[in-house]
Structures are given as structure tokens and as C-alpha cells.
Image (cartoon, coloured by chain):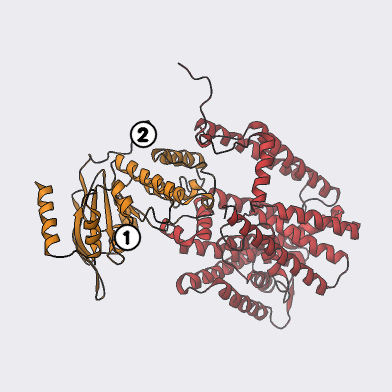
Amino acid sequence: MTDTPEPPPLPPPGELILSLRGISKNFGAVSALTDIDLDVHAGEVVALVGDNGAGKSTLVKVLAGVHQPTSGTITFRGQPVTLPSPGAALDLGIATVFQDLALCENLDVVANIFLGRELDAYHLDEVAMEVKAWTLLGELAARIPSVREPIASLSGGQRQTVAIARSLLLEPRIIMLDEPTAALGVAQTAEVLNLIERLRARGLGVIMISHNMEDVRAVADRIVVLRLGRNNGVFTPDASNADLVGAITGATDNAVTRRAERLRAEGQDA
Amino acid sequence: MTDQRPPTPLDRADVRVREDAGLGGTVRAFFDRVRSGDLGSLPVVIGLIVIWTVFTSLNPVFVTPNNLVNLLFDCSTTGIIALGVVCVLTLGEIDLSVGSMSGLASAILGVLWVNQGFPVPVAVLAVLAVGAVTGSVYAMLLNRLGMPSFVSTLAGLLALLGLQLYLLGSSGSINLPYGSWVVAFGQLLIMPRWLSYSLSVLPGIAILWFGIGAAARRRAANLSAPSTARLVTKAAVITLIIVLAVHYLNLGRGVPWMFGLFVALVVAMDYALTRTKWGRSMFAVGGNREAARRAGINVRRIYMSAFMLCSMFAALGGTLAAARLASSSQQAGTGDVNLNAIAAAVIGGTSLFGGRGSAYSALLGIIVIQSIANGLTLLNLSSSLRYMITGAVLAIAVIVDSLARQSRAAHGRA
């Protein structure tokens, strides 16, 4: 798939694309997020893990422009930005694939990929849209038999592929995947993890939310743990399961683990 | 090293896709679709054959050319109303007040044109404006207050009927002048023979012209395309059917201008629904409202456009019905007009559940419904029996729609 035309200049690999500092979000008296820091580089997969209610979805919604943070700064490619609406986030280059995918089952793959962004509003250019759909799916090495079948006939993994292909249409810098492997079988999960690898290879920053530690280890470059709306450590995929689970559940949240975490962080910085 | 074989089209690269090329493939694909519950216009065609056979055997007058010409006159008025119903059904909503709207339209036409002496175009524009306002009220109630269209249009049914009775006053009916072109359009005006024959070959030419152009563009883009032979066959079959039908009608009075207007509106709506961004958004909202909203579609505006179109088509249909009857009366738009229009859309293949439908379903469905009404009238049956039979047909149509939907879900084609 190297013969496809490259999208406009992607940031060089490793460039810091998105940076959150001190993001907080309160819903009345409840602080869903408190002082969250998060960095995403180009060509990097950041896994966001945490227990139910840890604030993962709230954070994703802040980045998708659905919620506005109560305080804190968002820096996108070096510029401080605000994300007042989902459209603003999309225009900036932050695409989100929500857990329920939001596909229209009665429409075919092409129509779903181009939904709301059809070419030529008064005389739909079906040929150009179909070619572009195949190009996007080809870049993802996706195995969709036909783009003229309604979404209802596709498997869960194929639907996830269509949802991701759709988010690529606007050539985003960051793509957020909310539980991309939930409710998928073994082969389909592998398919989606392959997709994530390809997104990374294209130089996108990927934020992936998952409850499945195996999937997270398989593709993530860094694992960011949230707990009760706060940062609770950053791990590498080779961190032990006990450490990860401990950070997620808070079971080992004590002076010793915190010290170990601090030492590890200093070691990484050096 | 050169590869002699043509490159595999993009959309045939996957080995799992069976290529349904040629006539055999077309037939096979058709049966596959039907088996999985994607019935399209099959039920209506079968229904039409059954109905016409039964009525012809009961009374041979049914298939005489002049009776069919009458049938087409009657189809046009309710058919235009059904065309509007297709719009709201596509969104998974309903408008139960189309009958009252059409009755109100005929009353406004009578009052403005005959009683007040306004020119006809002004009266018709006023009627369409009232339709647009009515539709926008339904859409506002849905968008702003979340009032289900089922309830708001049921309320509208009564309110509009009341307004119709108020406008007509104590006299109860206004006769439209017989010499006027409006009444002539509704009762008499027939296309010249040469024009009807010329128009009847137009669809075939359009299929060939646009089909070959689209196929060439698809091949240039390395996509699979239908063969020219297949296009020619399709165009030939369709042209043959239409020319024969037109010829048969020309044995009698000919093709009514009013039916021509109806077909033109159907073709325009079909283009809007299938070839424009607006149409794509309609099906998206009907299929998954939340997904459409997240895709950046202005869902409220889509609802607004659909309800306004529906009420305006109902108003136009009511105007033509008044012309057909040469009067605006208290009975206009009451009785079975409402259900006939909705039944026509559903029988033609527009799903009550939203997200599926076609403008042509209004055309096919109304021919079925009107055939039943016409045939029962020829048999001199009382309206009590006519209502019961029409009701049963509507029930059967909805059952077929329901079963087909379940089958589609089971075959993954929802």
C-alpha cells in the first residue's frame, strides 16, 4: 500500500502533537477529572486504562469537544487550543471512534464513510467516493469484501474498520478509539490491533481506551493509568501485570509503589 | 514483463465477492436479494397482477383503456400526497394529517379563487404556503418539544379539518368553474399522441445515456461496471413496457397531463433522494438518528425539510383533487384519502420503520390502491365493503413489510 498518495505533510515521527496539562472537569460537585496530564506523539499508541468511573470516557469527550474542561490547557502542535465543539476538534485533526461506532446500518460502506461529507452535494460523485473508500480501506489493509453492501451485513471487526476508515477521511493527526476491541472475537480483535499498528505506521498519534490488558500490551507504546479522575502512573507495555492492575485498582497504592514508580520515571527520563 | 490480463477491478479484488455478471448473474442476484428479505418492488408487482386478474375476470370493463385512463387521473391526486408521505416515512416518522391537509388545500383554493377572485397561481401559491407552514409546525413540535409526529399530526388532522369546515362556512361547498383550465387539467387534458410516445422512450434513452457514461467513468477508475449489453437489455425491456402501456392508453383517451405531472414529481423526488446529499442525509437520519447527528448532519433541518415537503405535497394533491372533482367540499380529504396515501407508500415498498424507501413506491403503491378502489366501484360494491377490503390490503402490506424486515435482519441486510 505504498503506492497510495501520501496525505499532506504529517509531523515527523516522534513530534509532540497533543499535550494536556492540568485538565480538570467538574460536573457540579463531582470532579470527574483532576489535574490530568497527557502527551501524545506522532506515531505513538497511548493506551488509556482505568477502572469504571476512572474518567477515561470524560477525558475522551473533552478531547472530542463534547465536554469543555473546567480548567487546564490543551496544546495541539505547539499552539494552545480550545475545543468548543465536536466540529472544532475534527477541524483541528482530532478524530474519535466512539464505542458504539455510530454507523447507519441501512446505508452501504461508501455512504457511511462519507456521511455528512459527501462529494458534490447536488450530484453525488459515487465513483470518486467509492475509489476513495477503497483507498482508505486499502491503507488499513482492511478485508471488506464489498463497499456496496449495507453495514448490517458486516461483522463487528469490519464495522470497526469502517468506523476507523471514516475517521481517516479528514486526515486527522490524532485518532481516539474508545474500546475498539470490546465485544469482538479473537480473529476480529487481531484484525483491529493490526489496524492500530497501521495507524501508528502512518504517523498518527493513537489514543486507545481498553479494559483488555492483553490488547493494550500488544500495541501500546505507553500505558497511561487513570484512577478516580487522576493520573495514576505511566507504564511501558513490559510492566508487570501486578503493577498495572495495582495502579488501576489502587490496591497497591502506597508509599512503596509510589517510590518505585518515581524511580522508574526518573530512569526513563535519564 | 507485461501483464496481458486487465487489472482486477478494485471492488472485485476480494475472492469472496461473487461477480454477478451477465443476465444469469443479474437474475441470481435478484433471487438472492428477494430471499434475504430485500423485496424492493416485488410485492407490489405481484399484488398488481393478482388484483388486475381478479377484477378483469369479475368485470371486463376494468382493463378497457378508458377505465385505465380514469384510473390514472385518480392516481395522480392521491399519488402526489403519497409522495410526501414517502419523505416522512423515510425518516421513520409519520404524517396522519395529509388527508385533512389536502381537504384544507381544496377549501383555500375555492375561497381564494372563486369567492375572493384571486388569480389561480396566487391561490395555489397560498395553498402551498399553508402546507409549508403546517409542516414546519409539526417539525418544530418534534425538534423543540420532542412531540412524537404520530400525536402532533393526529392533532393536526382534527385542527386542519376544523379550519377546512370553517373556511367553507355554512354553504359547505364551492363549485369550481367548469370552463377553467384548472378543472380541465383535473378532468380532461390529455397529452398529444406524439408527445406521449416521445416521452415513453425517454426513460430508456436516459438509462442508456447515463448508464454508459457512468460505466465508462467506473472503468476509468478501475471499478467494476455493468456491461453495455446489460444496459441495453434493461433499457429495451423498460422502453417496451412503457411504450406498450402508452399505446394501450392511446387506444382510449390517452395519457393525462395530470399523471405526467405526478410522474415528473416522482422522478424529481427520486433524484433528490438518491443522488443528493440531502437524500443521503434523509436515509441516514431514518436509519440511525444519533449516527447522523454525530456525522455532522443537521438532523433538525432534515426533519423540517421532510415535514414541509410532505405537507406541501399533500396541499398540491388536494388542489388537484379539487380540480378533479370541480369543487371544494366538506368531504374533500376525508374518508380514506389519508390511509390510501399512507398505504400507497407502504405497499410500494417504503418501510414504516424508517431508513428504506423510494419515490417510486408512491407511484407503484397508488396504482395498486386505486386499482382496488376503481375495481370495487365497477363491481358496484358499497363503500362499507370498500373500506374493509382497503383496510385488509393495508394490513397485508404492513405485515409483508414487517416480515421482510425480520428476514433482512436475519440475513444481515437490515
Which chain identifier belongs to the orange chain? Answer: A
Q: Nearer the viewer, residue A142 or A82?
A: A142
The first of marks 1 and 2 along the sequence is 2
Assign the N terminus of chain B to one quadrant of the image.
top left
Residue at image mark 2:
A5
The amino acid type, in three-letter code, at marker 2 is: Pro
The amino acid type, in three-letter code, at marker 1 is: Ser
Residue at image mark 1:
A85
Q: Secondary structure at mark 1?
A: loop
Task: Give above or below for B63 relative to B144.
Answer: above
Numbered badge on residue B14: none
Residue that sits furthest to the bottom in the current view = B170
Residue B276 spot, x, y in % from top left: 52, 50
| Dot 2: chain letter | A
- The label nearer to you, 1 versus 2, is 2
Assign the C terminus of chain B to one quadrant of the image.
bottom right
Which chain identifier belongs to the red chain? Answer: B
Q: Nearer the viewer, residue B335 or A227?
A: A227
Quick check: do tags 1 and 2 share a chain? yes
Residue at 22% of width from left, 61% of height from top? A246
Q: Secondary structure at mark 2?
A: loop
In this rendering, does residue A117 appear at all? no
Residue at 37% of width from left, 53% of height from top? A180
Task: Give above or below for B16 relative to A206.
Answer: above
Residue at 73% of width from left, 37% of height from top? B236
Residue B366 spot, x, y in % from top left: 72, 59
**Gap between marks 1 and 2, in whole Å?**
31 Å
**Quarter assignment of residue A183:** bottom left
**Quarter assignment of residue A38:** bottom left
Residue B406 spot, x, y in % from top left: 62, 59
Q: Nearer the viewer, residue B250 or B43?
A: B43
Q: Is residue B86 left or right of residue B69?
A: left
